[in-house]
Image (spheres, helix red, strand yellow):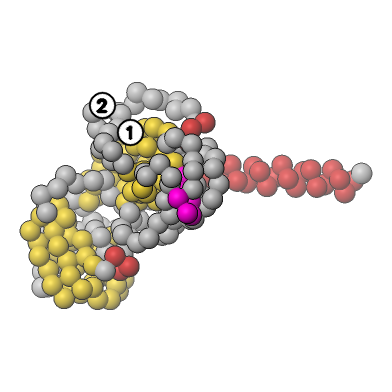
């Protein structure tokens, strides 16, 4: 009997540990949020047909979305205070994605959010909105002219605590309803989905996105769930 009770206690402790790991502190309204649990760089393929997002009850459904402009590089092209820089190697070409922000190819380089420096063809690229780290890359070609498209958030913090980062190319799993993954999140089986209509619904002060799962062979899943955006992070220039 003692060993049986020990096994039960072990299961309870493990479950408590998972809950603590998934708890996310409220955003720091004074600047960029730093999160120790970082989003995975690649989506996790799955063939499950369930989702936990639809069961989430938002405690503050009417709270407006906070918009945070992440300025990781100053006007002089130097890293902002608190940012660390590492070597990011070379990229093929970079183009303006929004005012003062560039995206570089190939997508595998992970240089979709970059700031210019005084040195021609040398850029400082962010790793994630909530990470104070930059990678220095050298581009073969640079075109700073913006594309003229509406800027989408670099990252999203959702009401259920998930942190999601904008997709940067690559081959992702799919869904039978045709919706595609637009942001990957730091929670398994949770993606921000894109389809007909705006990716981020900004018609009301609480912005919303659609959340759901992705799977191999365009698996079938329940309809996506609407989720409030607590904080939207945009890459910006000073």
Is residue 184 on the magenta stretch?
no
Q: Residue 24's spot in the image, x, y percent? A: 47, 42
Q: Is residue 4 above or below residue 96?
A: above
Disc 1 packing (10 Å; few <14; some 14–19; many ≥20): many
Residue at (84, 43) in percent of width and height: 5
Q: Is residue 142 above or below residue 7?
A: below
Q: In the rendered image, which residue does mark 1 sit on? A: 208
Percent position (x, y) of residue 190? 46, 45
**Please, what secondary structure does the residue beneath circle 1 have?**
strand
Q: Secondary structure at mark 2?
A: loop
Q: CA distance from mark 1 to mark 2?
A: 9 Å
Chief SS of the magenta region = loop
Quadrant in which the N terminus appears: top right
197 or 137: nearer the viewer: 197
| Along the line of sight, the residue nearer the viewer: 42 or 122 | 42
Is residue 214 located in the magenta-colored stretch of the structure? Answer: yes
Question: On the rendered structure, is 17 left or right of 165?
Answer: right
- Residue 201 picture quarter: top left
Asked if disc 1 and disc 2 are in contact, CB closer than 8 Å, the reply is yes
Extent of the magenta region: 213-218
Residue under numbered circle 2? 204
Rendered location of residue 133, percent (x, y)? 32, 61
**Which dot marks residue 145?**
none
Q: Residue at x 26, y 69 (%)?
A: 106
């Amino acid at each position: 009997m003692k060993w049986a009770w020990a096994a039960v206690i072990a299961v309870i402790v493990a479950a408590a540990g998972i809950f603590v790991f998934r708890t996310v502190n409220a955003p720091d309204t004074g600047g960029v949020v730093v999160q120790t649990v970082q989003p995975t760089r690649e989506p996790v393929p799955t063939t499950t047909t369930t989702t936990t997002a639809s069961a989430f009850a938002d405690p503050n459904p009417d709270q407006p979305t906070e918009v945070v402009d992440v300025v990781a590089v100053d006007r002089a092209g130097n890293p902002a205070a608190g940012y660390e820089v590492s070597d990011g190697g070379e990229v093929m070409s970079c183009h303006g994605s929004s005012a003062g922000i560039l995206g570089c190819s190939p997508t595998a380089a992970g240089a979709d959010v970059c700031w210019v420096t005084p040195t021609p063809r040398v850029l400082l690229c962010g790793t994630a909105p909530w990470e104070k780290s930059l990678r220095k890359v050298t581009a073969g070609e640079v075109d700073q002219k913006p594309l003229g498209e509406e800027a989408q958030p670099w990252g999203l913090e959702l009401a259920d605590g998930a942190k999601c980062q904008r997709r940067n190319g690559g081959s992702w799993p799919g869904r039978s309803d045709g919706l595609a993954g637009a942001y990957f999140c730091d929670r398994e089986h949770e993606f921000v989905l894109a389809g007909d209509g705006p990716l981020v619904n900004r018609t009301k002060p609480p912005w919303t996105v659609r959340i759901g799962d992705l799977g191999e062979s365009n698996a079938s899943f329940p309809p996506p769930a609407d989720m409030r955006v607590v904080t939207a992070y945009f890459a910006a220039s000073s």
